[in-house]
Image: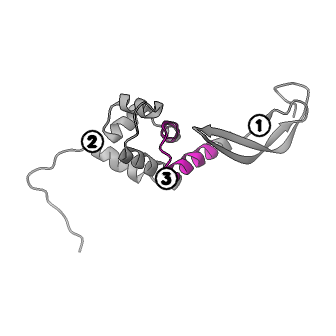
Amino acid sequence: MQCLSCNQGTMRPSMVEIRREVGERAFVASVDGQKCAACGVASFKGTDLARFEQAVAAALAASGEASGEAFRWMRKALNLRAIDVATLLAVTPETISRWETGRVTIDRGALALLALMVLDHDRGSAATMDALRARAAAKPLGKTVKIKLAP
């Protein structure tokens, strides 16, 4: 296949490096892809990029990284808008902005909850996010609540 970038070279199977920087950390992975023999432009599957970006988010979550850049990366890895995270964490969107830009130190509990959501997502679960959504939409209990016990 001819290179779409330079129209001169041929794309050949090759290992391609994906690199992303989050704050002061660099994350790197090698994936199967193609590289132009003439200009060196590389391509790879979008699914590999998505898997890599989720892996970066999981590494940030597991490490306890507390920078605004890490918070933003993890939020975006979950495909959540700042207003969505603000609702889940019971803060204002402006607070999320201040955390992500580093103007205010990120609340430790909020960071832990976001990290748990990322790690859940990495395991194919949404338990933490579901629990936070339930609390955001909580309905008061009546004076008498009937409970059915399993035998």
Crowding at dot 2, Cα within 10 Å, few <14 / some 14-19 / many 20+, comes out as few
Residue of label 1: 43
Residue 61 spot, x, y in % from top left: 50, 49
Q: Quarter-wise, where is residue 3 in the image? A: top right
**Amino acid type shown at disc 1:** Ser
Residue 131 spot, x, y in % from top left: 34, 50
Magenta part mainly helix, strand or loop? Answer: helix
**Badge 2 element:** loop
- x 47%, y 30%: residue: 101
Q: Nearer the viewer, residue 121 or 57?
A: 57
**Amino acid type shown at disc 3:** Leu
Please give the range of residues in magenta. Answer: 50-75
Residues at marks 2 and 1, CA–CA distance in whole angstroms: 44 Å
Nearer to us of marks 2 and 3 is: 3
Residue of label 2: 137
**Amino acid type shown at disc 2:** Ala
Nearer to us of marks 3 and 1 is: 3
- x 69%, y 40%: residue: 19
| Residue that lies at the very extreme toward the bottom in this rendered image | 151
Residue 22 spot, x, y in % from top left: 58, 39
- x 47%, y 44%: residue: 66
Residue 92 spot, x, y in % from top left: 33, 31
Residues at marks 3 and 1, CA–CA distance in whole angstroms: 28 Å
Q: Earlier in the sequence, mark 2 or mark 3?
A: 3
Q: Are marks 3 and 1 in contact (CB under 8 Å)?
A: no
Residue of label 3: 119
Q: Nearer the viewer, residue 116 or 63?
A: 63
| 36 vs 147: above or below | above
Q: Earlier in the sequence, mark 2 or mark 1?
A: 1
Q: Are marks 2 and 1 in contact (CB under 8 Å)?
A: no
**Badge 3 element:** helix
